[in-house]
Amino acid sequence: MRDVTARGVRMRVVEAGEGQGPPLVLVHGFLSTHLDFDDVIDQFSLHFHVIAPDLPGSGDSEKPSPARYAYGVESFAEAVADLISAYGLGRAFVLGHGLGGAVGITLAALHPELVNRLILVAPLCYPFAARTVFRVPLLPMVGSVAFKQFFGKRAFRSHFRNWVYSEGFGLPEQVDHNFEAFNSPSGRESAHAVLQSMLDTRPTVARITRIRRPTLVTWGREDRMFPAHHALKLAREIPDARLELFDTGHAPHAERPEDFVSIVRQFCEGKRG
């Protein structure tokens, strides 16, 4: 692990497989950390130089006040751009899950010179209905207080059990680790600011057709967070995108890690399965 300053914010970065191959940057989703990729990072490190940051406000990265840092997709994309430059990676393969997928879309649209190929895992890109657990936090005045003080471990675990993983898939232990990283005043304040920013997906949608890098769209057929028909729409809108569907929920890399790594490797090597 090491710390890198990006856009004035200290980011904790996990690095694996240095010298093993081309750079692969992994960008996690909402309420998560680099642990989002615990099930695949070792396998990826056999073939790639893996860089997995905790986004600003998450995990062990700095959690500045929203008054000082504009939490949201574009800010995160610029932070990842700084990270790629700080490591001197040139062009990197960029893989983003959920919110991290929106970051990948934005990075590829705004900084194509930094992206070799783009891998999107059920990305946040089209409008979606906020689930019940997040509707109260979005209410004026009381929502912020409710989220910062009463969104406890049970609700956190329930969110991942009911919306992230498919029915019958046990909760990985990293969910509890991610809760501990979230469960501080600064962590909750940062997460609430990110949640508010996620509701307006129009800037991300507008950037989809600007992607000119080879792109792999992956999705779980049983995704209850963002429905799988979004995958078909996204793959049509990105020029020459490749689409892979898994019999999983919102996190195919966690539920089918070996198949996921194999497909991503084939794509990065320019092969078709």
Image (cartoon, rainbow, N blue to C red):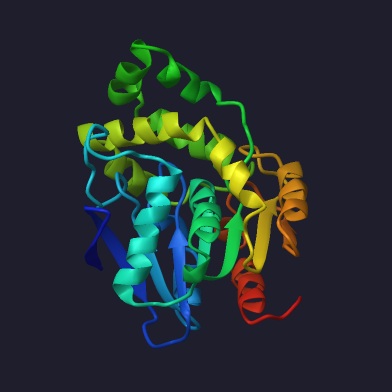
Is 231 displayed left or right of 157 in the figure? right
* Horizontal and vertical percent position of residue 237: 74, 51
* Horizontal and vertical percent position of residue 60: 25, 52
Is 26 displayed left or right of 1 in the figure? right
* Horizontal and vertical percent position of residue 263: 66, 71
Q: Count the numbered circles shown.
A: 0
* Horizontal and vertical percent position of residue 111: 48, 62
- Could you say which quadrant of the image residue 81 lies in? bottom left
Q: Residue at x 62, y 32 (%)?
A: 127
The quadrant of the image that shows the N terminus is bottom left
Residue 165 shows in this picture: no
Q: Vertical placement of 55 versus 268: above or below? A: above
Q: Residue at x 58, y 36 (%)?
A: 202
The quadrant of the image that shows the C terminus is bottom right
**Residue most extreme to the top:** 141
Q: Between residues 241 and 212, which one lies in front from this camera angle?
A: 212
Is 141 displayed left or right of 115 in the figure? left
Q: Residue at x 30, y 48 (%)?
A: 56
Q: Vertical placement of 87 versus 210: above or below? A: below
Residue 207 shows in this picture: yes
Q: Between residues 169 and 98, which one lies in front from this camera angle?
A: 98
- Could you say which quadrant of the image residue 38 lies in? bottom left
